[in-house]
Amino acid sequence: MISTTSPRRGFIASTVATTAALLVERLLGATAEGGQSAPQTKTDVSGSGRRIVTGLDAQGRSRIEVDQPLAMATADGRPHRSDFWLVRGLPLPLNGPIEPTADWSAGTQAPAGGAFAAVFSWPAGYSYPRHMTPTLDFIVVISGHLELILDTESKILRPGDVLIQRGTAHAWRVPGPEPCTFAGIGLDAAARR
């Protein structure tokens, strides 16, 4: 349980709770555009989001390897789970300090052997230059749009879309008139061979 004894931790707990609620609403299709109920069928995935996975082509240029819908709606209205990636090892201590501790300096890289989780809010028109980090990143768009710019192509991510960024060169841009809010988790990864 997150302690809320300090204003900073209270803010973080509140932000995480709000973001989680928005994310669940988007991914489970609680409401579609315009506030109407989302379709509840097994085959209709409109508004459910996509799973996009990056990789490298034969020339070593960043590209999209997978772009497929996340099937989140069910015919019977029961909750559904759609795994978008699996990490097959980590064990981490669950009784460690409440993170992030005061010595953490946020950046584009995960701590050696570790991971970071963050919520980002970028204004309309914002861009982040081309870069590459030795991390496996999970990006989930909560609101607005986010353009992923790779060496060979670009893709507009929409609310509910999940990107698995596998240590490839990329840049970001927030297209359109509204800001973009997204959640990101970065896992330290081994260098490509």
Image (cartoon, helix red, strand yellow):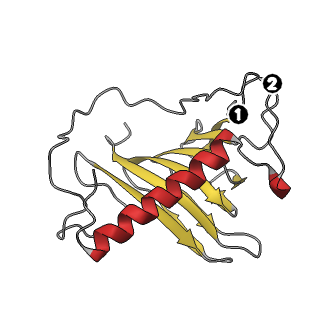
Q: Measuring 67% from the left and 60% from the top, which residue is drawn there? A: 147
On the image, the x and y values in percent for residue 12 come to: 37, 66
Q: Measuring 63% from the left and 67% from the top, which residue is drawn there? A: 180
For the residues marked 1 and 2, what is the alpha-carbon distance in whole angstroms? 13 Å
Placement of the C terminus among the 4 image quadrants: top left
Task: Give the left or right position of residue 71, taking residue 110 as reference.
Answer: right
Identify the mark at residue 68; answer none if there is no mark. 1
Considering depth in this image, is 154 or 179 the residue closer to the camera? 179
Q: Secondary structure at mark 2?
A: loop
Q: Crowdedness of circle 1 by 10 Å Cα count: few (<14), some, many (20+)?
A: few
Identify the mark at residue 43; answer none if there is no mark. 2
Up-down relation of residue 149 to residue 134 (above or below): below
Task: Give the left or right position of residue 38, taking residue 5 as reference.
Answer: right
Q: Indicate which label's residue lies in the foreground, 1 or 2.
A: 2
Considering depth in this image, is 86 or 61 the residue closer to the camera? 86
Q: Crowdedness of circle 2 by 10 Å Cα count: few (<14), some, many (20+)?
A: few
Q: Measuring 38% from the left and 40% from the top, which residue is drawn there? A: 192
Up-down relation of residue 173 to residue 69 (above or below): below
Identify the mark at residue 26; answer none if there is no mark. none
Considering depth in this image, is 48 or 152 the residue closer to the camera? 48
Query: Would residue 172 be seen by someone viewing this image from the given angle?
Result: yes
On the image, the x and y values in percent for residue 54 come to: 57, 42
Which image quadrant is residue 4 in? bottom left
On the image, the x and y values in percent for residue 59 come to: 57, 41
